[in-house]
Every structure is written in structure tokens, then in C-alpha cells.
């Protein structure tokens, strides 16, 4: 299956958010569209998160925010409060906020959201390592 090959190619990429990896994510998302398997939404959310981070890294903040919005939508999270209260996924909401602020050139607020994102991720890593 071509989708599995794309997924394996993506996992083999050295630069996780480089141009080649981002192109692979785009192709993979097209292959995943409309699939109704029980895990399909989780996989689409993961690919959309990667595309959102690719867009953020490339400076395409509006596209990044759109992809991250789609990611949250695929996760079936009822509202932003639920997203921000769950420490395992709060970083997605924070990076989405940062992308929105960057798209509006609100650099100070974007920086604050990114700092909060880093703190959430660091806290999660510390919990895992304990």
C-alpha cells in the first residue's frame, strides 16, 4: 500500500520537519483522506500536527494555524478549555495560538504562547522520565 510506504519514508527522514518530510506528509494526508478506519482520525491528526509544525517552521503561520485547527478537529475535542486542561495535548493548543498570533504579527503574545508550550512539553518529559 502506497500510504504505508509514505509513512515508513516519513519515519526514516532525518530532518523531521524538513522540506522532504513536509512533502511526504502532504502526500500521506491526501492518501488518508476519507478513510474510515477506527484509528484513521488519530493518524490524520498526527499528520496534520506535523504539517502545522512544518508550516510554522517555514514561516507560513496562517497555513500552520489552519492545519493545527484541523488537527484539533480530528481529535474531536469539544472546546479549547478541554484542550488546554489536558497536559498531554495542551502543547497543540499553545502552538496553534502562537501561529495565530504570528499570522497577526503579535510577536509578544506568540512568544508567550511558545514559552508556555515549552514548559508544558518539558513538564511532560520530566513525568515520563520519572
Image (cartoon, helix red, strand yellow):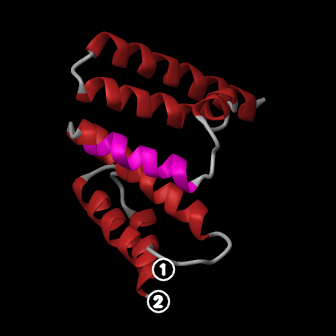
The answer to whether marks 1 and 2 mark residues whose Cβ atoms lie closer than 8 Å is yes
Give coordinates of residue 118: x percent, y percent: 50, 23
How far apart marks 1 and 2 lie (CA) works out to 6 Å
The part of the chain drawn in magenta is 63-74
Q: Residue 52 in the image: state x and y as whole percent.
A: 37, 46
Residue 31 locus on image (x, y percent) = 40, 78
Q: Residue at point 40% right, 65% down?
A: 10
Residue positioned 55% across, 56% down in the render: 74
Q: Residue at x 26, y 63 (%)?
A: 23
Q: Judge the density around disc 2: few (<14), some (14-19), many (≥20) Cα neighbours within 10 Å.
A: few
* Residue found at the very far top of the displayed protein: 108
Kindly report the secondary structure that dominates the magenta region of the rendered protein: helix
Considering only vertical position in the picture, is 51 above or below 104? below
Number of marks: 2
The residue positioned farthest toward the bottom in the image shown: 1
| Circle 2: element type | loop
Residue 13 rendering spot, x and y as whole percentages? 36, 61
How packed mark 1 is, by other alpha carbons closer than 10 Å (few <14, some 14-19, many 20 or more), is few
Q: Is residue 54 magenta?
A: no
Look at the image and tell me whether residue 49 can be seen: no
122, 90: nearer the viewer = 90
Is residue 18 toward the left or the right of residue 51 in the image? left
The C terminus: image quadrant: top right
In this view, the residue in front, 74 or 111, is: 74
Residue 6 versus residue 95 in the image, above or below = below
Where does label 2 land, which residue?
A: 1
Which residue ends up furthest to the front in the rendered image?
A: 78
Q: Which mark is residue 4?
A: 1
Residue lying at 55% horizontally and 64% vertically, measured from the top left: 43
Amino acid at each position: 500500500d502506497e500510504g504505508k510506504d509514505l509513512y515508513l519514508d516519513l519515519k526514516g527522514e532525518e530532518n523531521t520537519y524538513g522540506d522532504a518530510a513536509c512533502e511526504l506528509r502532504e502526500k500521506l494526508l491526501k492518501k488518508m483522506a476519507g478513510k474510515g478506519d477506527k484509528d484513521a482520525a488519530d493518524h490524520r491528526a498526527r499528520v496534520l500536527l506535523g504539517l502545522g509544525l512544518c508550516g510554522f517552521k517555514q514561516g507560513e503561520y496562517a497555513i500552520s494555524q489552519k492545519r493545527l485547527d484541523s488537527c484539533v478537529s480530528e481529535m474531536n475535542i469539544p472546546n479549547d478549555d478541554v484542550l488546554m486542561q489536558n497536559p498531554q495535548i495542551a502543547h497543540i493548543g499553545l502552538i496553534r495560538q502562537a501561529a495565530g498570533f504570528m499570522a497577526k504579527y503579535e510577536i509578544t503574545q506568540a512568544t508567550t504562547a511558545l514559552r508556555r508550550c515549552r514548559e508544558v512539553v518539558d513538564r511532560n518529559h520530566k513525568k515520563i522520565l520519572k
